[in-house]
Amino acid sequence: MRQNKIHILLIIGMCISFGFMYHYFVKALQYDVTIDHYSTDVKEGQHFVLIVEEKDNPYFTELLKGALDAARPHNITVEYIGPKQTNIEEHIKLIEKAIAAKVDGILTQGLSDEEFAPIIDKAISKGIPLITVDTDVKNSKRLAYVGTNNYQAGYKVGQAVLSETKGPIQVGIVSGSLVANQHKSRVKGFLDAVEHAVRVEVVAIETSNLSKIQGAEKTFQMLRTNPEINVLYGTSALDGVGISDAIEKINPAEPIIVYAFDDLEETIDYMNKGVIHSILRQQPYDMGYKGVNLLIDILDGKEVEPLNYTDTEFIRKDDSLTNITLKKN
Ligand code: BGC
């Protein structure tokens, strides 16, 4: 009888420990899935999705940080997705999937008017609040935009070139893209700013496809074909590094003044080494933070401003470097 009781107790004990093992095994499996698809561990509450053009680009990791910080106190899950390399078709498919999944809110870049407006309008017609972040699609029904005024940012760089240089200037532009809205605006703003300055001529515009390597290659070719270039302007986060890699390789006899976007670590290193003259710093963290709060306000039934521009500012290694006199061609 006593032996029977011991057996029963042993069996119960084994069942309990097996139960625990099973529970933690299943949890461990789910943990992997969570890390892959969600960048915050909050699992209750609402589900937002943040779609960017390059998921691993450090510029966007900063934007994600802001989004997560804003979401955490509200128990909101932020799903962070995007292609490995910028790809409009893939980006649109991800928006499509988010709509099909009936998420509670979408934050996305709007890379081009023609391709993005229909899918953005679809989200709105299905009752899913969507706001554009970093790059806007003005002709869409998006509820708000949060990010840099990209035309003004390009204009600011143009004005800086005018006020910080003397003599004849030949400019080479390396643009992330010539079809994406933010880069088109940054190039247009720059061209408008220097339009009436006869001493400034834009001699080449090439695209890097947001890739450091392509940025370096394009700069290399550009400087070979146009050795008179004395100002280089990179419009996307990795262009400053690509341009600088090429300059280091070529080691030009005459100085080239480089204007870059975004304070990524490598870009700052090049600025500290004196290869980059000036960086126009955007505020990706603020974009993510404000973006999530705008979605929350919309879901709370509040009216939101349609245009929410975040700050930009120049940073330079040494502001005494301004007013540089360039070589005469
Ligand atoms: C832009 C983003 C772009 C990123 C690419 C940033 O300057 O604001 O729109 O995707 O560069 O590196």
Image (cartoon, rainbow, N blue to C red):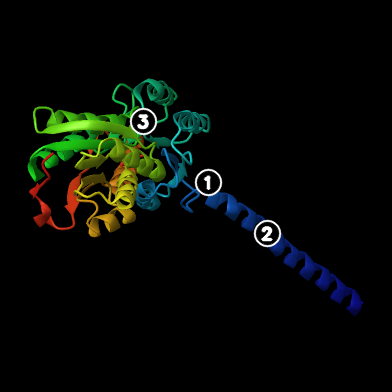
Residue 65 visible, this orientation: yes
Q: Earlier in the sequence, mark 1 or mark 3?
A: 1
In depth, the one of 131 and 328 nearer the eye is 328
Q: Is mark 2 within 8 Å of ligand 1?
A: no
* Residue 291, quarter of picture: top left
Question: 102 left or right of 109?
Answer: right
User: Amino acid under label 1?
Assistant: His
Q: Where 142 sits versus 48, above or below?
A: above
Q: Quadrant of residue 115?
A: top left
Query: What x and y, as percent, mark residue 240?
Result: 29, 46
Q: Name the residue under label 3.
A: 110
Q: In this view, does 309 lie to the left or right of 105?
A: left
Residue behind mark 2: 25
- Pointer 2 and pointer 3: residues touching (CB < 8 Å)? no
Q: Could you say where residue 243 lies in the image, as x and y percent from the top left?
A: 31, 45
Q: Which of marks 1 and 3 is in front?
A: 3
Q: Residues within 10 Å of mark 2 (few under 14, many from 20)?
A: few
What residue did someone put label 1 on?
37
Front in this rendered view, residue 235 or 25:
235
Q: Which of marks 2 and 3 is in front?
A: 3
Quarter of the image that includes the N terminus: bottom right
Distance from label 2 to label 3 (Cα)? 41 Å
User: What's the distance in space between the residues labelled 1 and 3, CA to CA?
Assistant: 22 Å
In the rendered image, residue 246, in percent from the top left (x then y), is placed at: 33, 47
* Disc 1/disc 2 C-alpha distance (Å): 19 Å
SS for callout 1 = helix
| Ligand 1 positioned in quadrant | top left
Identify the amino acid type marked 3.
Answer: Gly
Binning the other alpha carbons within 10 Å of mark 1 as few (below 14), some (14 to 19) or many (20 upward) gives few
| Front of the two marks 1 and 2 | 1
In the image, is residue 165 above or below residue 18? Answer: above
